[in-house]
Amino acid sequence: MISQDMKDWVVLIVDDELDNLNVARKVLSFNGAEVHVARNGVEGLDKLAEIIPTFILLDLSMPEMDGWEMLRKLRQRPDAQDIPVIALTAHAMAGDREKVFDAGFHGYIPKPFRIDSFLDEIHRCLNEFNSAP
């Protein structure tokens, strides 16, 4: 069953790991989202000339430009200030979640993510973002 709100989603996934990128893309596409992908932060920022995403799923460790730097550059752009950015990362050690939120991410989904709860995690992150003061 395709969720009506997901049919309205335009998602940018930025991840250099093809398996993770493809699984996330397939789950979101299957549920009605329009999905765009990039393999690093440079490509991710370039994609923003073509689309205005509902949210961005952003890996933290990538070549050329990592997710931390992409988020910093993203927040400097007036057209991208309000886009929710969710870290989708293998950084899952003690304290990593706090570092992610301290850096300004709106959500945190550790890899490997569970397909059966992936969409629930995204919804949770977006609901928290939308209910923040």
Image (cartoon, grey):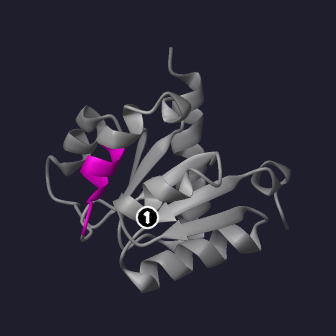
Q: In which quarter of the view is residue 15 placed?
A: bottom left
The residue at the far top in this view is: 133
Q: Nearer the viewer, residue 96 or 49?
A: 49
Magenta span dominant secondary structure: helix
Q: Which residue is mark 1?
A: 43
Q: Is residue 120 left or right of residue 4?
A: left
Give me the residue at 39% from left, 33% from top: 75
Give me the residue at 46% from left, 45% from top: 85
Q: In which quarter of the view is residue 36 placed?
A: bottom right
Q: Quadrant of the N terminus?
A: bottom right
Query: Where does the image place residue 42, in percent across and percent down from the top left?
Result: 37, 60
Residue range of the region highlighted in magenta in the rendering: 64-71
Query: Where does the image place residue 103, in percent across and percent down from the top left?
Result: 25, 37
Give me the residue at 64% from left, 55% from top: 50
Residue type (three-letter) at the residue carrying disc 1: Glu
Q: Nearer the viewer, residue 81 or 28?
A: 81
Q: Nearer the viewer, residue 81 or 130?
A: 81
